Amino acid sequence: MEPTGPPTARQQPSSGRPPSGRSLVVLDDGECWTLLRSGRLGRLVYTDGALPAVAPVSYAVVGEAVVLALASGGQVATAARGCVVAFEVDDTDQESRTGWSVTAVGPAQLVDDPHLAARLRDEGLVPWVSSATATYLSVAVRVLSGRRLVQTPRAGG
């Protein structure tokens, strides 16, 4: 049977160049916050029925919290509220196989301040499912980590 859909990493055509070396650089908190503020879409990692789950979510950074826009009454908002969750955002370059990833971990609480919720809506923070009414969850960041995969020069070249 022939594969369908976009090519996987194993199916990617070769550029004809030998792969360069890559190294992993640990990011400091300042760079992690800068990268978090640069995005609008990330992944929420939470527990649903004692099983790990991941969902794409729209977000914004407010102070030292990551505020997520979720569909009101949705399964994700219900499962994550009041729990410790992880939030991840990244960017990669498929050709060079470089990129970065930032993960924030902390308790998720419902945003119950109507003024903050209105401000977030006015600033365009809406759920990934665009037709849904928003529920906002704030993740108070307690653990922050980041990594960048960078190219390193090849030995002898």
Image (cartoon, rainbow, N blue to C red):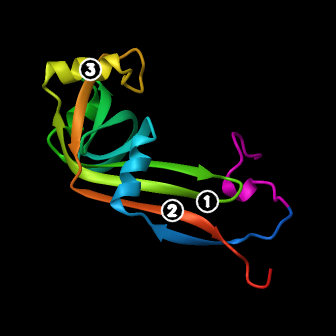
Asked whether residue 88 is in view, the answer is no
Q: What residue type is labelled 2?
A: Arg
* Residue 43 locus on image (x, y percent): 40, 43
Q: Determine crowd level at label 1: few under 14, some 14-19, many 20+ residues with C-alpha closer than 10 A.
A: some
Q: Distance between the residues labelled 3 and 2?
A: 33 Å
Confirm or deny contact between disc 1 and disc 2 (CB under 8 A): yes
- Residue under label 3, please give it: 119
The numbered mark at residue 148 is 2
Identified at 55% across, 64% down, the residue is 149
Q: Determine crowd level at label 3: few under 14, some 14-19, many 20+ residues with C-alpha closer than 10 A.
A: few
**Quadrant housing the C terminus:** bottom right
Q: Which of marks 3 and 2 is nearer the N terminus?
A: 3
Membership of 13 in magenta stretch? yes
Identified at 28% across, 26% down, the residue is 74
Q: Which amino acid does label 3 sit on?
A: Arg
* Residue 94 locus on image (x, y percent): 66, 53
Q: Which of marks 1 and 2 is nearer the N terminus?
A: 1
Q: Which amino acid does label 1 sit on?
A: Thr
The numbered mark at residue 98 is 1
Q: Determine crowd level at label 2: few under 14, some 14-19, many 20+ residues with C-alpha closer than 10 A.
A: some
Q: Give the range drawn in magenta.
A: 1-15
Majority secondary structure of magenta residues: loop
Q: Is 29 left or right of 6, judged from the image as shown?
A: left
Identified at 36% across, 34% down, the residue is 59
* Residue 78 locus on image (x, y percent): 21, 32
The numbered mark at residue 87 is none
Asked whether residue 78 is in view, the answer is yes
Q: Is 85 left or right of 129, judged from the image as shown?
A: left
Q: In which quarter of the image is residue 102?
A: bottom left
Membership of 129 in magenta stretch? no
Work out which residue is located at the far right of the displayed protein and give it.
16
